[in-house]
Amino acid sequence: MTVYRRRLTSSFHAIRCSLERRLEFLRGQALDLGLTEEDIEDADLSGDVIEEGNLDSVPALFLEEATYVEDFIADLRKLGGDSKVEQLLLDLQELLARRETILVFTLYTDTMDHLRDALRHVYGSQVACYSGRGGETWDGTTWQVVSKEEIKRAFREERIKVLLGTEAMSEGLNLQTCGMMINYDMPWNPMRVEQRIGRIDRIGQRYDEVWIRNYFYEDTVEARVYQALEGRIRWFEDVVGELQPILARIERVIRAAALAGGDARERTLEDAVEELLAELDRREIAALNLDEVFDESLLAHSAPEPILTLSDIEALIVGSSSHRRDFHPHRELVSAYVLRRRHDEYVVTFDPALFEQHPNSMRLLTYGESLFEELLAEVPAPEELPEGLLRLSDAETGLRAWYVSDEAAGARLVSTLGNLQAASRRLAPIVGETFRTAAEEDFERRTCGIGERLREAAGVHQRANTTRVIEQLKDLLRQAACIEIAQLSEGALFLQEVPAFRFGEDALARLQARGYPYAPAVRIVGHPELSPNDPFLIETMTQSVAIREREAERVSRRIADLLPQAAAAVQELRDSLPDGEARHVG
């Protein structure tokens, strides 16, 4: 039912395809259950499918379900058009008159295929798509498979105006030349929308603003949850910040409400949204506002102009005695090399723009790339500084600076490799104290106060990290308690039937009695707030014992993994505070 709900709110075509596959299985015309890999991955159904049991033993239920599915498909066919498709055609006509290209995201390949066939009649070869099958373009007769690089190049060159894609595109393509996106359907997890937006909202984006439109079928659970929260948060600006623990629960809220029926759905939805809004209120009051505490000037002081550019590094490594025989210019690509090391061969570049065009067939040599680190380690360091160059350093901050003699100021800062190479042609030996004194005074002026600001920034980040870890641990402990409540209340149709919701305290007591990892987790974060309307609890109550046990193991492992971090974070915070304040830290 989770699969069908998601597909129904993606497109009528997607749900019809899914039900037609299901019908083939029920009639004995197919061996699989009618689920695609996208369905199993999206809804985490791998365990549920295995636990279906012996389906051959219930032919009567198959006949009943087959009749129901046939009627449902017939109703879908009666609908005729799809309002989303009609809206998409109108929006594309408007938006493409204002900007050159547009991305359209959807959850399912079935929906993407339906859209591309609808759009090719209007846009022809200017429509392309990208999914788990790879890139595909229309040649006027059929859809042709092409490489990811070809899709990116054609889109950047604006030969492709409309690019349709599934979640595979949200991880595989960087398309910052595009300034518009339509989410044809909205994932239940907001973080997936953030991944989609990350394809265009990134360094190199040429527009000051990117335009994003989100599609919902009116009055669906998804629409009501997202719209209820829309006015309270800056959507997809806050999803990776302090509100992430709250937003991570949205998927469970939607699932619990979508799978509830009748009046129960309305109650579940209203209670869950009210609880999310209340939690937002509490966070706004108690949250650490990093924007107010963190001094932006720290960034300017602690991030000076880079001493080396990638071009500088390219010249040093390619021209070094260690590697000059290993690099061979690429026959077709300017700024690319064929690097031969031992028995391996790599296509590499120091140019980020070139790498963006060939991310799957080329490696970018820069810090963080393992191959680059190996090459750099093999370049011999200079034995001593050139005569006439003075190096000063500050032990507290780790900052270093190099100076050469200057007739006007006495000493001049060497800030980049280019400055050093220019100055090295006329370096003179260091004579007298005038040069050294001038250099030390300039260095002290530049580093004054940086140590204090860096300590302040470290403290802010430390408190933010402690808050994040504690919230994660608290949420996991709440999940463990919900699973325990579901086990304790086995047999009760509704949790509200249990007097005074006493299972909550009983569940936490039982968890603590088991010792590690629950007892230390409770000591660190206290008792999490529990509610009979918790979406995770409502979902857990409907699961089989086997699935609950699997979930309990998962949560237990996550708590155990997080405990050392949480304990260390709390201790570091206590050590950094005065004694009076430290006593109040958990």
Image (tube, grey):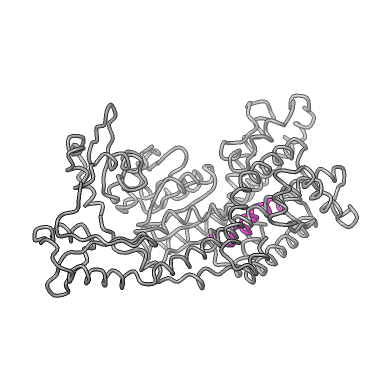
| Magenta part, dominant SS | helix
Residue that lies at the very extreme toward the right in this rendered image: 499
Rendered-image quadrant of the N terminus:
top right
- At a point 76% along the width and 59% down the height, the residue shown is 266
Q: Is residue 474 above or below residue 117?
A: below
Which residue is outermost to the bottom? 408
Q: Is residue 83 left or right of residue 445?
A: right
Query: In terms of depth relative to the viewer, which is nearer, 164 or 526?
Result: 526
Where is residue 578 drawn, in percent x and y? Answer: 60, 68
Q: How many marks?
A: 0
Horizontal relation, residue 398 to residue 319: left or right: right
Residue in the image at 78% along x and 60% along y? 267
Quadrant (top left/top right/bottom left/bottom right) for the C terminus: bottom right
The residue most toward the front is 432
Q: Is residue 112 above or below residue 322?
A: below
- Residue 309 vs 98, above or below: the answer is above
Nearer-the-camera pick, 98 or 555: 555
The answer, for residue 123, to whether it is visible in the render is yes
**Image position, residue 123 (x, y; %):** 39, 52
Seen from this angle, which residue lies furthest left?
426
Q: Specify start and end residues of the magenta stretch as a single range.
A: 241-258
270 relative position to 422: left or right: right
Q: Position of residue 553 (x, y in %)?
A: 69, 39
Q: Residue at x 22, y 39 (%)?
A: 337
Residue 142 at x, y percent in the picture: 39, 38
Q: Is residue 48 left or right of residue 87?
A: right
Residue 575: within the magenta? no
Query: Would residue 188 be seen by someone viewing this image from the given angle?
Result: no
> Image quadrant of residue 57?
top right
